[in-house]
Amino acid sequence: MPVVISGTDNFVLNVDTLGTAAPGEFNYDGKVFYATPQSTERGVVPGAQFFRLNSSLLGTNVNTAQSVLGVGVTLSASTVYAFEAFYGLSKTAGTTSHTVGLGFGGTATINNIGYWGFSDTESTFAYAGTAGNLGGFYIQTASNTASSLASTSATLARTLRITGTVSVNVGGTFIPQYTCSAAPGGAYTTAVGSYFLIYPIGASGANTSVGTWA
């Protein structure tokens, strides 16, 4: 018979050391939830923190770091997180040549980070597939790193998709940011639907291995 919980009751798992995985198990080690669907194939259950813009966010016409979404997330110490994001950035004024870089601010300190990204620079968000406007990158620092092409166009739309992991040393805020290499002459707006999600996958300090890896 299934267990039914109603009203103000909560289902809470005690923190426990992970033993040998068994089919149907659900575990919690103090950082991450795990489930074992079959055999000993234990896997991470994403407890994702998620933020999505429901209205556009106007930035400023500067060459310093600014928040992509207007918010940051608070992360815990000694934890490895997986994350993914999609940003749509557009502007309609300014012809100063500049690139756009990505990075992370906040009070959290990190052991290491690695994320893959893909960018497209066009006149609008509509598909164009212009040769030379697409590019990929892999970044291993939280500091600002150029992540899209230089442009002098007044009307511009940049789409950026990233996915990766970060190992946190000291817990604190973690703020997705973008930086123009020069003030463009017109501010970028972050588009509706841009988002960031992040969830813990293990403790820091060693390879993260969940499942039957050998």
Image (cartoon, grey):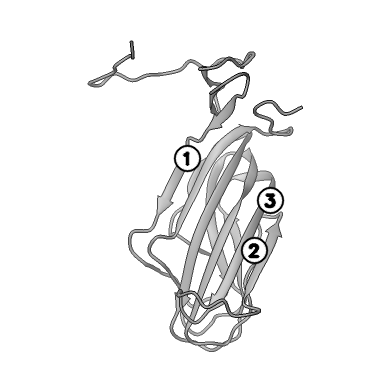
**Residue marked by disc 3:** 114
Q: Is residue 197 visible?
A: yes
User: Which amino acid lies under the numbered mark 3 shown in the image of this protein?
Assistant: Gly
Q: Position of residue 79 (x, y in %)?
A: 61, 35
Circle 1 — which element?
Answer: loop
**Is residue 55 shown above or below 12?**
below
Depth check: give the residue in front, 170 or 78: 78
**Residue plotted at (67% across, 34% down):** 204
The numbered mark, 1 or 2, whose residue comes first in the sequence reads 1
Where the N terminus falls, by quadrant?
Answer: top left
Q: CA distance from mark 1 to mark 2?
A: 25 Å
**Residue marked by disc 2:** 144
**Residue marked by disc 1:** 48
Circle 3 — which element?
Answer: strand
Q: Position of residue 159 (x, y in %)?
A: 52, 68
Where the C terminus falls, by quadrant?
Answer: top right
**Is residue 205 shown above or below 146?**
above
The numbered mark, 3 or 2, whose residue comes first in the sequence reads 3
